Image: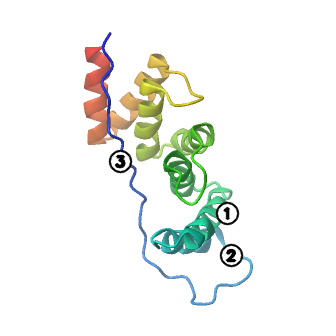
Amino acid sequence: MMKLSMVLSVRLVITPLWAEANPPAVMTAPQAFTQAIHNLKSQNKDDQARGFIKMQQAASGGNPKAEYNLGALYHEGLGTTQDFVQARYWIEKSAEQGYPAAEALLGNIYHFGRKGIPEDLEKAFYWTEKAANRGVTSAQRDLALIYHQ
């Protein structure tokens, strides 16, 4: 069976910036998410690290979009050290809540494996099919590839 290499592009979901200029010491999860996106857009590594911490805060509230984005940050090593095991953990939490982008990325992670995560075609098929049925075009393409294999 020939493995095909894929280029994975992770997009962070961008939301309008409505957080206060001087945010309070304790932020709500939506405020933390918005501030995280603002910091992550910066080219400054310290700002990105602050954005990562704010995304952790937002994800801890159980928001599937924030969980997916935190997983994507771990996956890409943005604002933190790249860690595929942590990436899978957060992306899977999001996917279990039905977030389509998380389902698609989780299927890809299981399809091709990552450092510390073995390939698992059964899980790859399960998550990729869920995302494909929700209309995620990258998952539809990946599902065809799984069928081909």
The residue positioned 32% from the left and 34% from the top of the image is: 6
Q: For the view shown, which residue lies furthest in the right direction?
A: 25
Q: Are marks 2 and 3 in contact (CB under 8 Å)?
A: no
Mark 2: amino acid:
Met
What kind of element bears circle 3? loop
Residue 134 on image: x %, y %:
34, 40
List the residue tagged with mark 3.
9
Q: Residues within 10 Å of mark 1 (few under 14, many from 20)?
A: many
Identify the residue under disc 1.
57
Residue 50 percent coordinates (x, y) = 62, 70
Left or right of 7 on screen, residue 36: right
**Label 3 or label 1, whichever comes before in sequence order:** 3
- Its colouring scheme is rainbow
List the residue tagged with mark 2: 27
Viewer-closest of 90 and 113: 113
Disc number lying in front (2 or 3): 3
Residue at position x 32%, y 20% in the image: 146
| Cβ atoms at labels 2 and 1 below 8 Å apart | yes
x, y percent for residue 105:
43, 39
Q: Circle 2 sits in a helix, a strand or a loop, which is it?
A: loop
Q: Compared to 140, does 2 lie above or below?
A: above
Q: Nearer the viewer, residue 119 or 47?
A: 47
